[in-house]
Amino acid sequence: MKAIELKNVKKNFKDGDETIEALKETNFSVDKGEFVAIIGPSGSGKSTLLTIAGGLQSPSSGEIWINGQTLSEKKEKARAKVRFEEIGFILQASNLVPFLTVKKQLELVDKVTKGKNNKSGLDLLSRLGLDKLIDKYPDELSGGERQRVAIVRALYNDPSIILADEPTASLDTEKAYEVVKILAKEAKEKNKATIMVTHDLRLVDFCDKVYLMQDGSLSEKTD
Ligand SMILES: Nc1ncnc2c1ncn2[C@@H]1O[C@H](COP(=O)(O)OP(=O)(O)OP(=O)(O)O)[C@@H](O)[C@H]1O
Ligand SMILES: [Mg+2]
């Protein structure tokens, strides 16, 4: 069953007199339990696709469907509700709240989602070696530590869809593999639909499908 579907989605940006076609007409879906990778050059439209898929920005045309509901017809408040309940984002900048400790970042998820939280969130913290950092603020963490906190936060309320933009960018090889294995395990065991944008071709071995983004056009890689 489809967890996320883009139907005839396009995104243009205006740059003075010019129009940038960041995303050409795209039809794309990810099933529950499926873990897909998107690779492609810088500026090709990967983050644009991911943020549109998650309702963080609107397409210029086309529709986004999340677990059988279309985002396009919803007002911002209703879209935000779908985002909080269904989607875990790991964005390119780790986007932690600067004035909250690690522990408080996670409690915030609990509050917003009214305690849908699973205990395994705390297990994840220790698997990623973060339990000692629980009382620290983001600016007291290294880039890799911040990235891992953002990953735990995204998984914390057990969303049905995970959208991860370069989740391993600031991690060493061992931690990068650990993160991708966690994402793969979450997808398989909890039937989550997961999209991971990555530059690291070694990591796509853990994915069910690989898509290539080039100049705003998405195609499935079959070799
Ligand atoms: N808000 C915006 N306003 C104008 N142009 C934008 C905006 N966001 C993205 N673009 C342009 O759209 C294109 C796609 O950008 P996008 O961020 O999706 O690329 P990307 O594949 O994620 O690149 P990277 O690998 O460097 O993160 C680029 O040409 C970019 O400059
Ligand atoms: Mg990007």
Image (tube, rainbow, N blue to C red):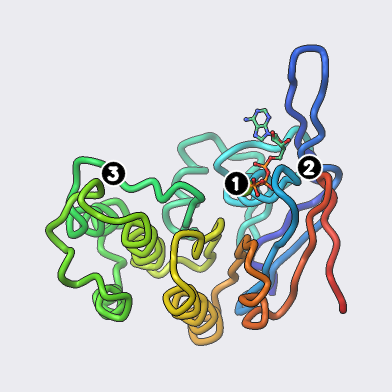
Which residue occupies 37% across, 61% down?
Answer: 144
* CB within 8 Å, label 3 to label 1: no
Q: Which residue is mark 3?
A: 97
Q: Looking at the rendered structure, which numbered label has been put on residue 201?
A: none
Which residue occupies 55% across, 85% down?
Answer: 188
Q: Which residue is mark 2?
A: 23
Tag in front: 3 or 1: 3
Q: Position of residue 32 (x, y in %)?
A: 62, 75
Q: Position of residue 82 (x, y in %)?
A: 49, 52
**Left or right: 90 as drawn, with respect to 113:** right
Quadrant of the snapshot with the N terminus: bottom right
| Neighbourhood count class around disc 2 (C-alpha, 10 Å): few under 14, some 14–19, many 20 upward | many
Q: Of callouts 2 and 3, which one flags the residue occurring earlier in the amino acid sequence? A: 2
Q: Can you tell me whether the CB of the residue at mark 2 lies under 8 Å from the nearest atom of ligand 1? A: yes
**Quarter-wise, where is residue 74 in the image?**
top right
Q: Which residue is mark 1?
A: 51
**Left or right: 191 as drawn, with respect to 27:** left
Question: Callout 3: helix, strand or loop?
Answer: loop
Q: Of callouts 1 and 2, which one flags the residue occurring earlier in the amino acid sequence? A: 2
**Quarter-wise, where is residue 192 in the image?**
bottom right
The amino acid marked with disc number 2 is Leu
Cα gap from disc 2 to disc 3, whole angstroms: 30 Å
| Neighbourhood count class around disc 1 (C-alpha, 10 Å): few under 14, some 14–19, many 20 upward | some
Location of ligand 1 given as a quarter of the image: top right
Which residue occupies 31% across, 81% down?
Answer: 127
Cα gap from disc 1 to disc 2, whole angstroms: 12 Å
The amino acid marked with disc number 1 is Thr
Where 141 sits versus 117, above or below?
A: above
Q: Of callouts 3 and 1, which one flags the residue occurring earlier in the amino acid sequence? A: 1
| Neighbourhood count class around disc 3 (C-alpha, 10 Å): few under 14, some 14–19, many 20 upward | few
Depth check: give the residue in front, 96 or 118: 96
